[in-house]
Image: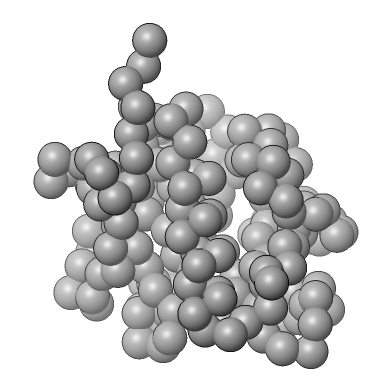
Amino acid sequence: MKEKHVIGEDISFAPIGVERIGEAMKFQADIIKRMNNKDFFTPLTKQEFVKPIKGRDNVYFLTYKNELIGLAVATCDIPEILLDYKITDKNVMLIDSIMIKKEFRGFGLQKQVLELLEKRVRELGLDGLVATVHPENIYSLRNFLEMGYLVLHSALLHGGERLVLCKKIA
C-alpha cells in the first residue's frame, strides 16, 4: 500500500519568488521529458512564470523533504482565446499548469492543489477557476471532473485540442 502524502503535513505548498524561475523551468523540462505523451503539456515560457509572481497570482512549489516534487501556476491574466469562457463578468483565475513528479502521482496531490487554489480564488474575491486539459490526459481530466469542474468547450490551444473546464466558486 502506498504511503499517504498530504499538503500541509509532509508536503509543503508555497509561493516562489522570481529568483527561483530557473528551478521551475528545469523542473518543468524534466517532467515533460519523462512523459509518454508530451502533447499533454506545452512548456511555459520564462515570462509565463514571471508574470504571475509579479502580479496577484503565484507560482507554487510542492516540496517533500526539501525535494521539489511539483509545481502549480495560477494567473488572472487570461489568454485572449479563453476570455469567452469566463463564467461571470468578474475575473476568474486560470490554472496554467499543475505538474507532479511521477513518483508522487496517485496520492491525490493534484486535487489538494485544486482545493488550495479554490481557497485563493475566494481570498481574491473571484468567481471561479478555468483550466485546460488535453482530452487524452484522463487522470487530470478525471480529477477536475471529480472536483466539480464542468467541460465547457474544446479549443485549439498549445498546439492542439484542449478541453476548457470551469468551476464556479461560491
Residue 45 locus on image (x, y percent)? 43, 68
Answer whether residue 106 is visible to the viewer in this image. yes
Q: Residue furthest right?
A: 153
Residue at left 47%, top 27%?
A: 106
User: In which quadrant will I find the C terminus?
Assistant: bottom right
Residue at left 33%, top 34%?
A: 5
Residue 146 locus on image (x, y percent)? 69, 41
Instruction: Tell me how the rendering is colored.
Output: one colour
Judge by depth and name the residue closer to the eye, 10 or 30. Answer: 10
Judge by depth and name the residue closer to the eye, 45 or 5. Answer: 5
Location of residue 83 by image quarter? bottom right
Judge by depth and name the residue closer to the eye, 151 or 122. Answer: 122
Q: Is residue 23 left or right of residue 89?
A: left
Tell how many labels: 0
Q: Is residue 4 left or right of residue 140?
A: left
Location of residue 154 by image quarter? bottom right
Is the residue 6 above or below the residue 71 in the image? above
Residue 47 locus on image (x, y percent)? 40, 78
Location of residue 80 by image quarter? bottom right
User: In which quadrant will I find the N terminus?
Assistant: top left
Q: Residue furthest left?
A: 66
Residue at left 14%, top 40%?
A: 65
Residue 9 locus on image (x, y percent)? 25, 44
Is the residue 153 above or below the residue 123 in the image? above
Residue at left 39%, top 74%?
A: 58
